[in-house]
Each structure stands twice: as C-alpha cells, then as structure tokens.
Image (spheres, rainbow, N blue to C red):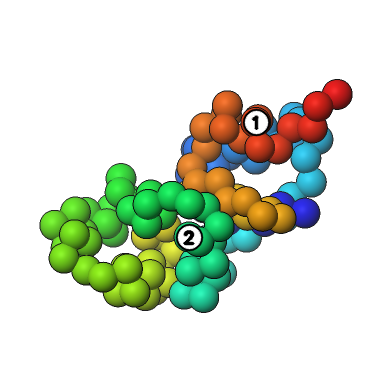
C-alpha cells in the first residue's frame, strides 16, 4: 500500500488523493503536520527517489520563505538539510507518496500515472 503524506488544506494534495480514488489505487494518508517523516525516513526516501534533495523542500511554502531557505540551503550540507527537513512537515514538498521501491514528490499526473497505473 502507498503511504501519502498530505496536508488537508493543500489543494494539490486533494487533487492527488482524488486521482488515486478515481484510479482505484489503495493508499493510506498521513498528516504531514502531525506525523511528518523523521530524518531516517527522509534519508531513505531521498536515496530511493534519485532526485536532488532540493526537490524535497516545499519552496513555495510560507515557512520556507520566512526562514530564508533559498539563500541558506546552498550553504548547508546534505546532512544539515535532511535534519532541517525532519523538524517540520510544512518544509516537506507535498504530497509525498511512498510505495514499494519508489517515491513521488508533488503531484504531476503523468508521473503518477506512469508509476502507479497497472497496464490493463
């Protein structure tokens, strides 16, 4: 089953969950504010994703902007960035979908479709 870290007031998260429902894909929702991934989980997801670490940050979020992270992140090591991400779920790009051997960050329908839809 896919774990989907979401924020209930996020329209992108709601679109992703609707897409999963419409396509009959089983998932469990995890509130990213209350039960965000810890540093070990983020380290694992980062390794599985093959993506740059910056993609894990919610760069359009209020907290990201308030903390001035666009200027601070380039100066930080990967370990420091992962530790920072683990401090607050609102720093993490959402939705964050984790399944057996894959990680999807954000909701791009074509990307989700190619990863999650089974050929009929």
The residue under the point 27% across, 57% down is 64
Mark 1 — residue?
114
Q: Position of residue 35 (x, y in %)?
A: 56, 69
Number of residue marks: 2
The quarter of the picture where residue 24 lies is top right
Q: The residue tagged with tag 2: helix, strand or loop?
A: helix
Residue that protrudes farthest toward the right in the picture: 120
Mark nearer the N terminus (1 vs 2): 2
Distance between the alpha carbons at the discs numbered 1 and 2 = 20 Å
Quarter of the C terminus within the rendering: top right
Judging depth in this view, the residue of 57 and 44 nearest the camera is 44
Q: Which residue is mark 2?
A: 46
Up-down relation of residue 8 to residue 39 (above or below): above
Q: Residues within 10 Å of mark 1 (few under 14, many from 20)?
A: few
Q: Is residue 99 left or right of residue 52?
A: right
Q: Residue at x 81, y 27 (%)?
A: 119
Residue 6 in view in this figure: no
Furthest-top residue in view?
A: 120
Q: Are marks 1 and 2 in contact (CB under 8 Å)?
A: no
Alpha-carbon neighbours of circle 2 within 10 Å: few (<14), some, or many (≥20)?
some
Q: Quadrant of the N terminus?
A: bottom right
Asked if 12 appears above or below 75 in the picture, the reply is: above
Residue 75 screen position, x and y as percent: 16, 65
Which residue: 19% across, 59% down?
A: 74
Q: Where is residue 46 shown, x and y percent of the image?
A: 48, 60
Near-viewer residue (69 or 15):
69
Residue 3, image x and y in percent?
Answer: 67, 56
Residue 102 in view: yes
Q: Which residue is rendered at x = 37% and y = 57% of the image?
A: 53
Where is residue 41, by image quadrant?
Answer: bottom right
Q: Secondary structure at mark 1?
A: helix
37 vs 67, left or right, is right
């Amino acid at each position: 089953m896919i774990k989907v870290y979401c924020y209930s007031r996020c329209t992108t998260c709601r679109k992703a969950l609707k897409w999963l429902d419409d396509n009959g894909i089983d998932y469990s929702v995890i509130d990213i504010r209350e039960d965000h991934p810890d540093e070990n989980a983020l380290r694992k997801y980062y390794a599985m994703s093959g993506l740059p670490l910056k993609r894990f940050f919610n760069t359009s979020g209020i907290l990201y902007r308030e903390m001035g992270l666009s200027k601070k992140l380039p100066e930080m090591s990967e370990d420091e960035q992962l530790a920072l991400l683990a401090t607050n779920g609102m720093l993490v790009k959402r939705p964050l979908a984790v399944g057996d051997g894959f990680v999807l960050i954000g909701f791009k329908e074509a990307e989700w479709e190619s990863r999650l839809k089974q050929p009929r």
